[in-house]
Amino acid sequence: MDLHEISEKLQAGAAKAVAALVQQALDEGYPAQKILEEGLLDGMNVIGEKFKNNEIYVPEVLIAARAMNKGAEVLKPHLAAEGVKATGKVCIGTVQGDLHDIGKNLVKMMMEGKGLEVVDLGVDVAPSTYVQCAIEQNCSMICCSALLTTTMGVMADVVKAVEEAGIHDKVKIMIGGAPVTQHYCDQIGADFYAADATTAAEIAVDYCAKVANG
Ligand code: B1M
């Protein structure tokens, strides 16, 4: 099969077909990462361009997003890194005012695939909620995703809330999402920036290993 079929079905919002095609691609031996990039993410990129150019609107994007999530669910067990044994716990959420969760879900999936325990706070997460969760659940890292230039500022509030709670020496903050940059991370005093889900998972695993080894 051609992985482009997955991209096309995703753009059409055909969630069941996307899930079935992802399974077929796995059965045919395509690597999970390739299916993610050349099938699912390719489709979302086209959707993103059309959305930007007002060729499609929120309902179509939502339907495509649902198809993306369905396909990603099928991929989930196959994205696990082989033989990696990691321990550690982090929490993740999309920041307050922001409802985009596809990237956040991918980051979570990659982290779980590498053996981390991930507390998913969902979307529209207030700074105090991250802090409360990190304290109550003993998380080594708070992971914040933002997709809007209007919501990425909440990440600075998360850093402030962590500092005010006096836990920054123990709990590190990682940020990411399309408008977020390393420069912004440095500017607000967050600890880590990752441009993609794979890098985010690697950073979290490395940091949790450091914590575990004292
Ligand atoms: Co939204 N939206 N949206 N949207 N949407 C964008 C982000 C936008 C760029 C589209 C555009 O105009 N070109 C634009 C933002 C403009 C800006 O701020 N500069 C936009 C807008 C304007 C809006 C609304 C305001 C539209 C409206 O209502 N008028 C509205 C806001 C709602 C809200 O949040 N309050 C809105 C709504 C929506 C939908 C609900 C319809 C839907 C979201 C559905 C869902 O998530 N369940 C949606 C979608 C799907 C998009 C686009 C098309 C795709 C986003 C996506 O999922 N990409 C997007 C256009 C685009 O990005 N090209 C757009 C795929 C995903 C895998 O990528 O999330 O970037 P991404 O994640 C990447 C990396 O960034 C990284 O890893 C992932 C890949 O490996 N990453 C991290 C993500 N989080 C990380 C955290 C980390 C590390 C890495 O560490 C913790």
Image (cartoon, rainbow, N blue to C red):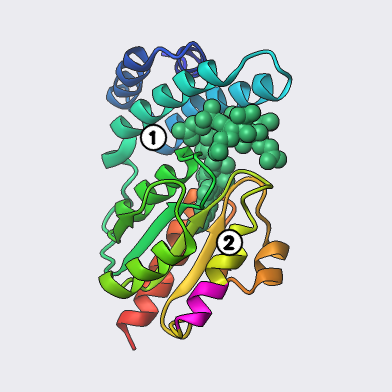
In the image, residue 205 above or below residue 49: below
CB at mark 2 closer than 8 A to ligand 1? no
Dividing the picture into quadrants, the one containing residue 46 is top right
Q: Is residue 172 above or below residue 81?
A: below
CA gap, disc 2 and disc 1: 34 Å
- Disc 2 marks which residue? 155
- Visible in this render: residue 74? yes
Amino acid found under the numbered disc labelled 2: Met
Name the N-terminal-most of marks 2 and 1: 1
- Which residue is at 46% across, 38% downward? 102
Between marks 2 and 1 in the image, the one whose residue lies nearer the viewer? 2
Q: Is residue 85 above or below residue 166?
A: above
Callout 1 crowding tier (Cα within 10 Å): few <14, some 14–19, many ≥20: some
Residue wearing tag 1: 31
Place of residue 82 in the rendered image (x, y in percent of width and height, measured from the top left): 29, 52
Which quadrant is home to the N terminus? Answer: top left
**Span shown in magenta:** 160-165
